[in-house]
Amino acid sequence: MASRNAVMPSVSLELGWPSYQQSTVERWQGMQQSFQQDYIAEEVPIALIYNGLPHVVMLATPTNLEDFALGFSVTEGIIADPSEILSVRIYNRANGIEVYLQIPEQRFQCLSDKSRNLAGRTGCGLCGTSTLQQVIRRPAPLGEGIIITSEELLSALSGIKHHQNINKLTGSVHAAAWAIPGKGIVELREDVGRHNALDKLIGSLFRTNRNLTAGFLIVTSRASYEMVQKAATVGITILAAISAPTGLAIRISDEAGLTLIGFARDDQHVVYTHPQRLLHNTPVFN
């Protein structure tokens, strides 16, 4: 990536779509019935429209939408640099939210050739792709990157739940977190979709001019190929997921030079690719 200047002129009109709602529910514990107020996460259709052309509709939590638009645009290869987002305007509609982005004409022409005007479900990584060539984008090889200790990884993992404000209430959203050695978690974004949470985080990292080689990424989901692809596309060299990776995610990580860690929870983790970036003080081999 070249310049990461992501100062975007924008008009944000995020009104009327809460990230969660309250509802009275009938709760049972054994044979004991009670009626309680519960918090339920919302998922709202978010339409991304480039230069007036609808591109994709994603179901997402209606928060941090400028971060989402920026992160999605970069990680999906629509733009090559955050500075290519010329403006963002967000409008509430009766049935969802429209995000209008203005990008350079050359980028828009490439985008319009892709024919991706389809709906993207909350957990979908392939929705909207119309050819096999669009599915698997091989990121450029990563540089040396950061080296962290297993203690720093476990410390960040243990602290992530304290930053998940929406999940504390609803229990149903994913998080993507950015941690820096010695500082712990410094940025976190939540969404009902794991890809959306990651795009929001990446957009936030660009906007705050974070050095993407100076920290590591944690996601509260499985490590599917598109999570690896998005991380490697922007130069992130370490990705830790609390659940398992897929075979394709492992292969792409290996090719790109990304350190992929799975089952990262409590006091355990599994390193699948490029283990040289994760130091263990007392390695144990079984």
Image (cartoon, helix red, strand yellow):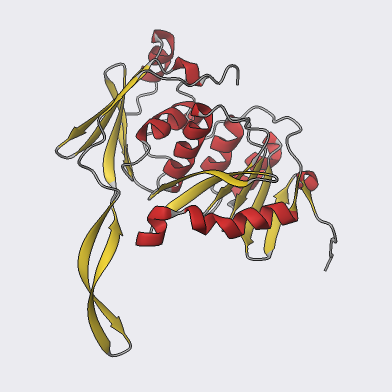
Q: Is residue 118 above or below residue 81?
A: below
Q: Is residue 171 above or below residue 182?
A: below
User: Residue 140's quadrant in the figure?
Assistant: top right
Residue extending farthest top: 105
Q: Position of residue 246 (x, y in %)?
A: 58, 52
Residue at screen point 60% across, 17% down = 2
Residue extending farthest left: 94
Name the side, left or right, on which 94 lies relative to 225: left
Name the side, left or right, on which 274 lies relative to 284: left
Residue extending farthest front: 183
Residue at screen point 29% across, 61% down = 39
Quarter of the image containing the N terminus?
top right
Name the side, left or right, on which 183 lies relative to 122: right
Q: Position of residue 47 (x, y in %)?
A: 28, 32
Viewer-proximal residue among 57 and 235: 235
Quarter of the image containing the C terminus?
bottom right
